[in-house]
Amino acid sequence: MASMALKSFTGLRQSPQEQQHPHFIAQALPRQQKFRVSAAKTSPKLTNRNLRVAVIGGGPAGGAAAETLAQNGVETFLIERKLDNCKPCGGAIPLCMVGEFDLPLDIIDRKVTKMKMISPSNVAVDIGQTLKPHEYIGMVRREVLDAYLRERAEKNGASVINGLFMKMDLPRNFEQPYVLYYTEYDGTKGGVGEKRTLEVDAVIGADGANSRVAKSINAGDYDYAIAFQERVKIPDEKMVYYENLAEMYVGDDVSPDFYGWVFPKCDHVAVGTGTVTHKGDIKKFQLATRNRAKDKILGGKIIRVEAHPIPEHPRPRRLSGRVALVGDAAGYVTKCSGEGIYFAAKSGRMCAEAIIEGSENGTRMIDEGDLRKYLEKWDKTYWPTYKVLDVLQKVFYRSNPAREAFVEMCADEYVQKMTFDSYLYKRVVPGNPLEDLKLAVNTIGSLVRANALRREMDKLTI
Ligand SMILES: Cc1cc2nc3c(=O)[nH]c(=O)nc-3n(C[C@H](O)[C@H](O)[C@H](O)COP(=O)(O)OP(=O)(O)OC[C@H]3O[C@@H](n4cnc5c(N)ncnc54)[C@H](O)[C@@H]3O)c2cc1C
């Protein structure tokens, strides 16, 4: 999860002005407000009813989308196949998400203020010294976060349906609705469920990496990583070490193209790793991650094993007619850090806002152009983030010498500040040119040193 800022030119962080400016505070902290839209529009006014939108999937993307729609005049249906779903996930969220989505502190298991980056040769660098007293990375359990967001959407007027979405009929003309087919579960038919249909004007696909909504609109595929995670209950005295600390391990042994992690949860730790290029070896990488952390998790008992795909890039198509994809269904996980919770919730909300604006608070029909505004805003806001992290992954995760250099670089205070600021606040501002130059020189120095070390090691082993 830790996003890394290299760069001279684009970091994602909050400027000091933004930190103090009352507008920023108003924007970042309170939960999203209701907003009333009154644009001049030509699409038909709806009579005797409001716009009907189905959100498929009740993860962070779906919960955030449904809440925003329901709060702002749209008749909203949220279809989730498993209301106690426990999404395989590290559960790390940035500080800005707590404010922007008004999350209560009691759903946050741990406030991580220290991060250890551990190199292939087990050199550990402590990150976190630059954090201000109120800053932290939140650690949540997904079953708790997702349920909270869904229930809040329901309180705001969304109809939450416990159902498995199967497929949909697309309208043949502008007047016709989308017809959704789903199996509804109400606990009375021994889990078999009842087949039902639902007619709506628009659909948001928030149904994750294996999205059926994406298939329904021929959205195309993306490359994906497979991520594997074990929840390990460790003795209380060992848990003290992970009180407010998370670990990231890099090296060929734990993953050829990603990192291994130990993240603290309420009463256990989550140990995991991922890979795109060597999916068949994932269990070997998991074992190596567990081995690297073995002194700290000794005596631990594995209480849950989980695995799930993580998208590598957006789908070729994220929109068709009045259907839009958000979150993992769209492919919004960042490279290098593997972060997707915040981006899921944010994209769900942004898509819902485009619908509200286009429909003038649910009073008019929308068209593809209205939904396109969500994509335009999304790409404009987050494209640099995805690009920077993509480059970082390519540079620093490609070999053990590069990873040694990466960890060495993380000891730099400026890097730490950039890293945490970009991760915690998701803001794009230029870095400090002098510090950036120093960083570039140091990075090259680290890479040269790490490569020289490898050559010496090679000589010794010949
Ligand atoms: C092992 C692992 C660790 C990760 N760690 C982190 C981390 O620490 N921090 C971070 O930010 N990101 C992390 N991620 C990524 C993060 O989990 C995802 O990006 C995020 O969950 C995306 O949210 P979403 O709402 O788009 O989709 P999901 O969370 O996948 O939610 C989709 C929902 O749709 C439902 N659904 C699916 N199909 C249907 C259907 N046909 N009908 C009805 N409902 C359906 C599912 O039950 C689910 O509730 C991790 C991912 C993995 C696999």
Image (cartoon, rainbow, N blue to C red):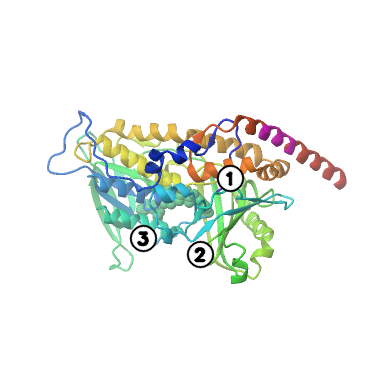
Callout 3: 10 Å neighbours few (<14), some, many (20+)?
some
Query: Residue 156 at what x, y percent from top left?
Result: 26, 53
Spatial CA span between label 1 and label 3: 29 Å
Disc 1 versus disc 3: nearer the observer: 3
Tell me which segment is drawn in magenta. 438-446
- Look at discs 2 and 3 and give the one toward the viewer: 2
In this orientation, which residue lies closer to the viewer: 348 or 307? 348
Q: Quadrant of the C terminus?
A: top right
Query: Which quadrant would residue 35 be assigned to in this image?
Result: top left
Mark 2 and mark 1: Cα distance apart in space? 29 Å
Pointer 1 residue Cβ closer than 8 Å to ligand 1:
no
User: Residue 218: image x %, image y %?
Assistant: 39, 38
Magenta stretch containing residue 240, yes or no?
no
Instruction: Identify which amino acid the numbered label 1 is placed on.
Output: Val
The secondary structure type at the circle numbered 2 is loop
- The answer to whether 288 appears left or right of 142 in the picture is right
The residue drawn where x is 27% and y is 51% is: 77
- Label at residue 83: 3
Question: Which of the pair 162/26 is nearer the observer?
Answer: 26
The part of the image, by quadrant, that contains residue 151 is bottom left
Q: Is residue 333 above or below residue 431?
A: below
Q: Pointer 2: what residue? A: 266
Q: Amino acid at mark 2?
A: Cys
Amino acid at the residue labelled 3: Leu
Report the number of numbered marks: 3
- Which residue in the structure is indicated by mark 1? 276
The answer to whether the residues at label 1 and label 3 have Cβ atoms under 8 Å apart is no
**Residue 18 position in % (x across, y down):** 45, 38
Which disc number belongs to residue 89?
none
- In the rendered image, residue 316, in percent from the top left (x then y), is placed at 44, 34
Vertical placement of residue 140 versus 212, above or below: below
